[in-house]
Amino acid sequence: MLRPSRHQVLTCSSLVVSLFALSACMNPGQPPAPPLPALAQPFPVADTNLAAAINDADLTHIALATLAQTHAARSDIAQLGTTIVKDLTANHDTLATLAATGKTELAAKPSAQSQKVIDQMKALHGAAFDKRYVRYLASTKKTTIPALDLSSAESKNADLQKLAADLKTKLLGYTKQL
């Protein structure tokens, strides 16, 4: 078997190197990686407090409106209960989405004070329920709305502030209907 001469080896190796160099020019490599998405920042304390206030108001009013559908003697209160459940469930779903982006965990149940009111209302039926429910809705002007206003004033999150303002408007509207 014949061995290649030194001249043949050098010629072939320079040809191979040239081919590799040319192939590198034709295929410049991988494109640059896309930028990483911005990580969601957790809510500051003021935004977390506003989210908690909205959450408690939503959960309490949804629970009471659900009771109104079955415990009320007046048909207008029962119908209003249906509207409240629909509206505030949508409001709560929006809040849950905002809280997830702000890495804030919402309570699954109303506060202990709100739960006490709900438990008291569960025992009432008919005219007694109607009277107490109307009084509770009227009291939101003195309790829930000022709490939302205070938390909203401290918050810097425009989406949460808008959600609180929408909730306030809805609650005032429900009160006017009775």
Image: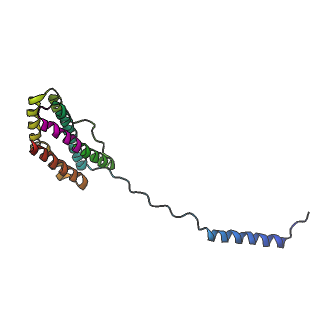
Q: Nearer the viewer, residue 75 or 160?
A: 75
Residue 3 position within the rendered picture, expressed as x and y whole percent measured from the top left: 88, 66
Residue 33 position within the rendered picture, expressed as x and y whole percent measured from the top left: 49, 61
User: Is residue 77 a member of the stretch shown in magenta?
Assistant: yes
Residue located at (18% from left, 37% from top): 65
Q: Which residue extends farthest top?
A: 123
Q: Nearer the viewer, residue 139 or 85?
A: 85
Residue 21 position within the rendered picture, expressed as x and y whole percent measured from the top left: 67, 70
Q: Which residue extends farthest right?
A: 1
Q: Nearer the viewer, residue 50 or 164?
A: 164
Q: Nearer the viewer, residue 85 or 117?
A: 85
Residue located at (71% from left, 72% from top): 18
Indicate the quadrant where residue 81 lies.
Answer: top left
Kindly tell me whether residue 78 is visible in this rendering: yes
In the picture, which quadrant includes the N terminus? bottom right
How many marks overall?
0
Please say if 7 is above or below 154: below
Indicate the quadrant where residue 133 lies.
Answer: top left
Q: Main secondary structure of the magenta part?
A: helix
Residue 43 position within the rendered picture, expressed as x and y whole percent measured from the top left: 29, 50
In the picture, which quadrant includes the C terminus? top left
Please say if 58 is above or below 6: above
Image-based side of 108 in relation to 71, left or right: right
User: Is residue 33 a member of the stretch shown in magenta?
Assistant: no
Kindly tell me whether residue 157 is visible in this rendering: no
Q: Which residue extends farthest front?
A: 75
Which segment did they paint magenta?
72-87
